[in-house]
């Protein structure tokens, strides 16, 4: 291939889909990746099972992409989550729906999805070059003309699609290479930050590791700003670790923690666990008191084992200044009320998150004001397109980020192929 119509940089979900969409329209496509194989991040997604999309209705889907999800309306009209499902079914991959709309291959193997995408790319005549890191994207007279590899080799093309991801999970090749190429085309990069990432805390019960490994099911986690306003609440599962808290709801709250720390210039913010989100504080108070009344000779720490995970009981009792060996007849009602309050709002001071490299998703990226949402083309440089995580779009885990990647990739690929005739 002397000169490509479209060069796609990056062999992740958005890059593979961009190559498929562009070649489908007859464009001569060259797909370049710096690693030794394509689809590495895809191969570890969804715990190695690859959560290919989410089945929620469009408006609901957008709500689960709190980082500029509304920008995706045009792309999702072009290539929706339903289209993603139909696409994989057409490749012979049967899908199944799990909790909260998450769609997985019936095989439960990410390799099934990766292999099908790569085979589709090859079958449409896309030229693939691996182990070919790009040094820079080349621009002349306000448009792209190709790329220069780190070896010095120049590859010419009419259009270039940048699909190299963010800075999260760098072992899969996402090391932030594309931001410099965007900036050299005149783009601004909104501040990068980790999201969908575990939270860090110095609380005594974290440092002592007494809760380490404790998994909580169906609790709720809230983030509070320094003025006492609740910023977000998520219900589901979480996990105490040696450094703080993790699990689905902690990850979902992480971006709100990062933003609150920055906005208020504080060293830590409060997150709180509600151990009984379906019950009012009054119900918790009465139910736990009744348990103690039913077994009046038992110490309250043993009575409460029927109501709470055993590891948290001593901490909650200490917070409410209650003697764990006390029996029902000696319970001070005011302190028991405090105990119920702490059960409904168990405070954890968190001072941040793990690093962006340890996050599932990168927040921030190429400023969306500089991108045409209908085509994913740069408004500043002709025939330069962006798709996937390099854009300032981020969603919760659960198939939302990969939906954004496939949708923007398809849109960028189709639009790039159409632009070569212009």
Image: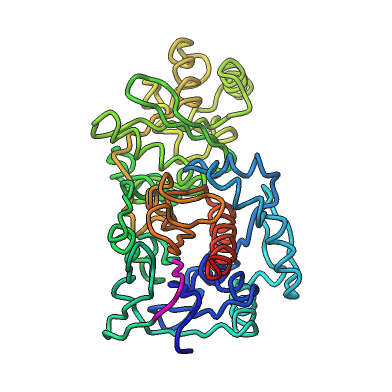
The residue lying at 58 percent from left, 66 percent from top is: 418
Measured along the vertical axis of the image, is residue 70 above or below residue 276?
below
Residue 300 at x, y percent in the picture: 50, 26
The residue lying at 60 percent from left, 76 percent from top is: 23
Residue 189 at x, y percent in the picture: 32, 50
Question: In this image, 269 relative to 369: left or right?
Answer: left
The residue lying at 35 percent from left, 36 percent from top is: 259
The residue lying at 36 percent from left, 21 percent from top is: 321
Residue 218 at x, y percent in the picture: 59, 39
* Residue 214 is covered by the magenta coloring: no
* Colour scheme employed for the rendering of this structure: rainbow
Residue 237 at x, y percent in the picture: 55, 44
Question: In this image, 145 relative to 119: left or right?
Answer: left
> Nearest the camera: 392 or 231?
392
Q: Quadrant of residue 63?
A: top right
Specify the segment rendered in magenta. Answer: 156-161
> Nearest the camera: 24 or 405?
24
> Nearest the camera: 124 or 288?
124
- Dominant SS type (magenta): strand
Measured along the vertical axis of the image, is residue 60 above or below residue 37?
above
* Residue 158 is covered by the magenta coloring: yes
Q: Quadrant of residue 140?
A: bottom left
């Amino acid at each position: 291939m002397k000169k490509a119509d479209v060069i796609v940089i990056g062999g992740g979900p958005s890059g593979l889909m961009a190559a498929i969409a562009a070649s489908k329209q007859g464009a001569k496509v060259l797909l370049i990746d710096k690693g030794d194989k394509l689809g590495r991040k895809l191969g570890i997604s969804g715990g190695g099972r690859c959560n290919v999309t989410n089945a929620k209705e469009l408006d609901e889907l957008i709500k689960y992409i709190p980082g500029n999800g509304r920008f995706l309306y045009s792309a999702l009209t072009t290539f929706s989550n339903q289209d993603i499902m139909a696409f994989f079914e057409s490749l012979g991959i049967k899908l199944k729906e799990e909790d909260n709309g998450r769609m997985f291959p019936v095989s439960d193997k990410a390799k099934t999805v990766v292999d099908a995408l790569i085979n589709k790319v090859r079958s449409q005549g896309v030229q693939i070059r691996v182990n070919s890191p790009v040094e820079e994207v080349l621009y002349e007279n306000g448009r792209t003309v190709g790329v220069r590899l780190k070896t010095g080799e120049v590859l010419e093309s009419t259009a270039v699609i940048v699909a190299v991801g963010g800075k999260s999970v760098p072992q899969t090749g996402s090391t932030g290479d594309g931001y410099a190429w965007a900036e050299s085309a005149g783009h601004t990069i909104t501040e990068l930050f980790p999201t969908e990432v575990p939270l860090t805390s110095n609380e005594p019960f974290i440092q002592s590791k007494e809760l380490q490994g404790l998994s909580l099911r169906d609790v709720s986690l809230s983030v509070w700003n320094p003025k006492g306003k609740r910023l977000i609440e998520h219900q589901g599962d979480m996990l105490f670790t040696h450094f703080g808290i993790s699990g689905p709801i902690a990850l979902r709250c992480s971006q709100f923690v990062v933003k609150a720390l920055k906005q208020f210039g504080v060293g830590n913010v409060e997150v709180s666990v509600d151990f009984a989100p379906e019950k009012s504080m009054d119900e918790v108070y009465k139910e736990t008191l009744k348990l103690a009344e039913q077994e009046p000779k038992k110490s309250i720490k043993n009575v409460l084992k029927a109501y709470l995970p055993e590891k948290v009981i001593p901490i909650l009792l200490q917070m409410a200044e209650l003697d764990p060996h006390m029996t029902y007849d000696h319970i001070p009602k005011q302190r028991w009320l405090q105990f119920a309050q702490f059960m409904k709002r168990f405070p954890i001071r968190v001072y941040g998150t793990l690093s962006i490299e340890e996050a599932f998703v990168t927040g921030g990226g190429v400023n969306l004001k500089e991108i045409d949402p209908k085509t994913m083309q740069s408004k500043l440089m002709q025939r330069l397109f962006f798709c996937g995580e390099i854009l300032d779009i981020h969603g919760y885990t659960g198939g939302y980020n990969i939906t954004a990647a496939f949708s923007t990739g398809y849109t960028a690929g189709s639009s790039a192929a159409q632009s070569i005739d212009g």
